[in-house]
Each structure stands twice: as C-alpha cells, then as structure tokens.
Amino acid sequence: MTNNQFRLSIAMFFSMSCFVGGIISGESGLRIILFFMMTFPSLLGLYFSTKAELRQYKWLLISLNYFFATYIVIG
C-alpha cells in the first residue's frame, strides 16, 4: 500500500463516518457539524484518489469522494 492509498483510505473512512453519523444523529445540531466536517476529508480524498494507482477502482473512488464533497451543496 502506497502513501496515497493509505491517505485515501483514512480520508474515505472519516468521510463515511461523518456521513453515517450525520444520518444517525437525526435533527440535532450535531448533524450540521458532521456534514461540514465531512467536506474537508472528502476534498482530500478527491486529491488522493487522482494520485493513487488504482486502475480499476479509480473512477469509482473519484465519484464517491465527489459525492461526499458536494453533499452539503446538494442536500
């Protein structure tokens, strides 16, 4: 596992944790904080997914990180 793949996996894990936590938290103020916290690691994930050598899964990871990075704007 290269550095970019390791950093990508950390960014993806943090983004997904914030996303799931935001859904589980319901209508509390914590939901807003978690969704805003999700944006920065998602942008990092976009960067690392373009740099990682993952031939087959590269576009899937880029699309998934783009979804997490733009969820605030759409939702």
Image (cartoon, rainbow, N blue to C red):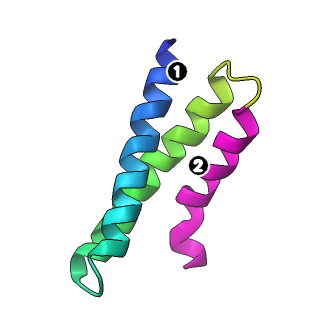
**Height in image: 50 above or below 63?**
above
- Residue at the (76%, 28%) spot, across then down: 56
Place of residue 71 in the rendered image (x, y in percent of width and height, measured from the top left): 55, 68
Mark number, residue 65: 2
Characterize the magenta stretch by its predominant secondary structure: helix
- Residue at the (62%, 33%) spot, across then down: 49
Question: Is 70 a magenta residue?
Answer: yes
Which of 46 and 6 lies nearest the eye of the viewer?
6
* Quarter of the image where one finds residue 35: bottom left
Type of amino acid under label 2: Asn
Type of amino acid under label 1: Asn
Place of residue 57 in the rendered image (x, y in percent of width and height, measured from the top left): 70, 33
At label 2, counting other C-alpha atoms closer than 10 Å, the crowd grade (few under 14, some 14-19, many 20 or more) is many
In this image, 36 relative to 3: left or right?
left
> Which residue is disc 1 drawn over?
4
- Residue at the (60%, 76%) spot, across then down: 74
* Quarter of the image where one finds residue 28: bottom left
- Residue at the (44%, 27%) spot, across then down: 7
Outermost residue toward the bottom?
Answer: 27
Question: Is 62 a magenta residue?
Answer: yes
Does residue 36 appear in the picture of this structure? no
Which of 71 and 19 lies nearest the eye of the viewer?
19
**Height in image: 13 above or below 21?**
above
Which range is magenta?
57-75
In the rendered structure, which disc, 2 or 1, sits on the residue that comes first in sequence? 1
- Kindly check if marks 2 and 1 are in contact, taking CB atoms under 8 A apart as contact: no
